[in-house]
Amino acid sequence: MRTPTVLFVMLSLSACWPEKPPEVLRLSGETMGTTYNVTVVGGPDTLDQSAVQSAIDTGLGRVNGSMNNWNPSSEVSRFNANETTEPVEISSDFSTVMAAANQINALSDGAFDVTLAPVIELWGFGPRRPESPVPTEEEIAAALETVGQSEKLSLDQNALSKSDPRVSINLAAIAKGYGVDAVAQEIAALGAENYLVEIGGDLVARGENAEGARWQIGIEQPDLGGAVVQQIVGVPDLGLATSGDYRNYFEQDGIRYSHIIDATTGAPVIHNTASVTVLAENAMLADGWATAFLALGSEDAMRIAQEQGLAIFAIDRSEGGFVTVASPAFEALLEDSD
């Protein structure tokens, strides 16, 4: 799984709890090639640092053991290594993510495609890093032969099969979000009602922060010169993810290559959209849609977001710096936060 593309700045608004301030537990660590941060506000008397850490470890263990492409013994790695077209029984976690991936693939006109794994690796953004990242047209064409999620993969409940033994899956664009959801589920099972779970910029917010207000999240301006907040949004019991092209890239012969791949050409996208933030019912969907929308660019992203009623916020590069555009659902969230 990849390092985060966007840094989120956690902010708070002034408000008051009806009684004394609640206890706040904060835990952080490393996972999936990035970091996690968990904040729990209040909760039952049995909720302590040890219990929350155990919940975090349980949730992360489930996802890393199932969908980590960098782990050769994970479910997804074993599926990729399987050289048959016979159905493979997969876990409920893996199945849930694949069902969401199929939904996003269909609604994004194929812009989101987990079978892009060989193309991603060809460009040097996967577990295997070639010595010469810029591939030839012939190499791209060969890699694209096994790409096409809707045609190459078949999901039947907890059974996954591929039509070509060479097909492989990369879940980096959606599994991190599911990891956030898995940790959140474990924390909720402890009786917590107010918490924020963040992994590498993907997050889920539930309830209220320590000031008794919505969790306030700052969306970073896509500029490596410094952490400048472009927009603040109050997150009301939703998942949030941002995909950006400015942290994960390489340059060769004076040309900049983003890690976001166009599924139709097999090459990095070349439009002016620098980042897209999505709010959805959970972090898994926000994560997958953020990648899909960045691959599409802001114009097509806004069209689909309006059709699907999704809250998205895009930042495009322009000659004067950056311009922003938001979907009606995102604008409604901002108005509701005022």
Image (tube, rainbow, N blue to C red):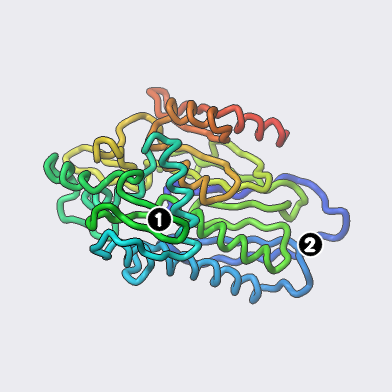
Say left or right for 251 vs 289.
left
Instruction: Classify residue 76 by image quadrant.
Output: bottom left
Helix, strand or loop under label 2: loop
- Residue pictured at 49% horizontal, 62% vertical: 93
Q: Residue lying furthest top in this view?
A: 319
Q: Is residue 67 left or right of residue 21?
A: left
**What residue does disc 2 label?**
22
Which sits in the foreground, 111 or 3?
A: 111
Q: Amino acid at mark 1?
A: Thr
Q: Is residue 10 left or right of residue 42?
A: left
In this rendered view, identify the residue nearer to me: 140 or 213.
140
* Residue at mark 1: 3
Q: Position of residue 98 (x, y in %)?
A: 44, 53
Check disc 2 and give the amino acid type.
Pro
Quadrant of image for the N terminus: bottom left
The single residue placed furthest to the right in the displayed view is 19
151 over 47 or under it: above or below = above
Across and down, in percent, residue 162 comes to 30, 55
Query: Does dot 1 land on a helix, a strand or a loop?
Result: loop
Neighbourhood count class around disc 1 (C-alpha, 10 Å): few under 14, some 14–19, many 20 upward: some
| Quadrant for the C terminus in the image | top right
Q: Is residue 186 above or below residue 259?
A: below
Q: Is residue 225 visible?
A: no
Residue at 37% over, 68% down:
74
- Label 2 vs 1, first from the N-terminus: 1
User: Residue sitting at 31 percent across and 44 percent down?
Assistant: 151
Depth check: give the residue in front, 58 or 9: 58
Asked whether the viewer can see residue 66, the reply is yes
